[in-house]
Image (tube, rainbow, N blue to C red):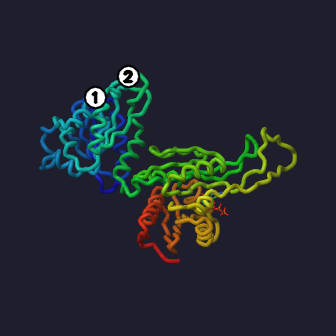
Amino acid sequence: MLEGRTVLVGVCGGIALYKVPLLISRLREHGADVHVIMTEAATKFVSPLTFQTVSGNPVHTSLWAPPVRWNVEHVGLAERADLAVVAPATANILGKAAAGIADDFLSTTLLAVRGRVLYVPAMDLAMYAHPAVRRNVETLRSYGCEVLEPDIGRLASGLIGKGRYPETERILTACLRLLGPGDLAGRRVLVSAGPTREPFDPARYVSNPSTGRMGLALAAEANRRGARVTLVLGPTELEPPSEVAVVRVTTTAEMRRAVLEEAQACDIVVMAAAVADWRPAECAPSKTKKTAGDLTVRLTRTEDILAELGKDKGRKVLVGFAAETDDLRANALAKLEAKNLDLVVANRIGLEPDRGFAAKTNQVTLLGRDGLVEEVPLLPKPDVARVVFDRVVAILEGGESGGSSRARR
Ligand code: CTP
């Protein structure tokens, strides 16, 4: 996702810096070229060799060191950086950057960066709450920089409060968003994901094998593209992406309530949830005791949430999934029409382990209102999510997006 992008990581002298190599390797896993600048204080905690090894590039520590390349190094790096991440950002660097002070390699480079800048403050709770630090944070935001609010938790001092260095995945999510296309900025997106469960006694339920993996990838992708995302999530072991508002539900009735309420304010709704189509007609208040004979559970239909959304669609873009074992295209098209959708993502289930429920990859066919069919090859679910939102963006822009695999029905 970050192939061809350059990320500058400015490491300051805070104890949380021992966690920064993990961020660097996650950025590199996504394909970014990472260059590290350490302040002098940072080098007192950890040797530059650590950062040189994880970044695969020389580490810059001083304006006065012999240059690695023959240009004005801090300017050259700043020019190349699509994103600069300052982590951990100490009170000192926040103050210097807000005031425009340039007295070392990092602060000088930060003044010259053309790309986006992300500060990840981590410090004592009283320091972070100090009016001088608060003012510096607001000043940096007014310059267009992003400042991640620290986590609340146990700090290096043993005190508990706001100032903790965030989880690496939260920082990575912010980086991906800042480097994303921004084509869903200002849009509100609702994604539903995971299964629903319909109990027939306190110990047993009817459900399906969905893990929510595809829906979580869609929520992360919408967030990466700049949308404000709400995720209505059925029971799953998987962690939802950070920076996404999560509404947890269990039953279809709960999912229906949450989706219909949240959808009102949304521009795009993607129903990736594997909603149970039937619920037990009765739910016993206590555990049904095992008897010698069989047990018959009568099932009644649940509400079709997506069909309900389709009846009062307004200007929303409505995306549904079609999980099919047979006649993929015909069945998916029938759902597109019957539920008044803009796009249906059809996938075959139950045959191969590398697609459908719980798999890490998926192979889907996209079917649009305009007669469009796009066969998407087998891809990791985050890449499938990207293709789906490419199409959604094209719908929002009022046209179709081209593609070599596109064909007319
Ligand atoms: N869906 C829904 N409410 C339901 C059932 C499904 O909102 N009670 C949504 C799913 O989230 C999906 C789409 O409708 O986006 C199609 O779901 P799918 O299970 O493939 O098909 P169904 O409509 O349930 O029809 P069938 O089970 O007969 O294939």
**Would the CB of label 2 be found within 8 Å of ligand 1?**
no
Q: Residue furthest bottom?
A: 409
Secondary structure of the residue carrying tag 1 is helix
Instruction: Provide the residue designation for mark 2.
Output: 157
* Viewer-closest of 81 and 399: 399
- Give the side of residue 193 with respect to residue 205, left or right: left
Q: CA distance from mark 1 to mark 2?
A: 21 Å
* Viewer-closest of 9 and 306: 306
Instruction: Provide the residue designation for mark 1.
Output: 132
**Would the CB of label 1 be found within 8 Å of ligand 1?**
no
Residue 371, position as x, y percentages in the image = 52, 75
Residue 55 lies in quadrant: top left
Q: Residue shown at 49%/70% (left/top)?
A: 374
Residue 300, position as x, y percentages in the image = 75, 55
- Give the side of residue 382 with respect to residue 52, left or right: right
Residue 157 lies in quadrant: top left
Q: Amino acid at mark 1?
A: Ala
Q: Residue furthest top?
A: 158
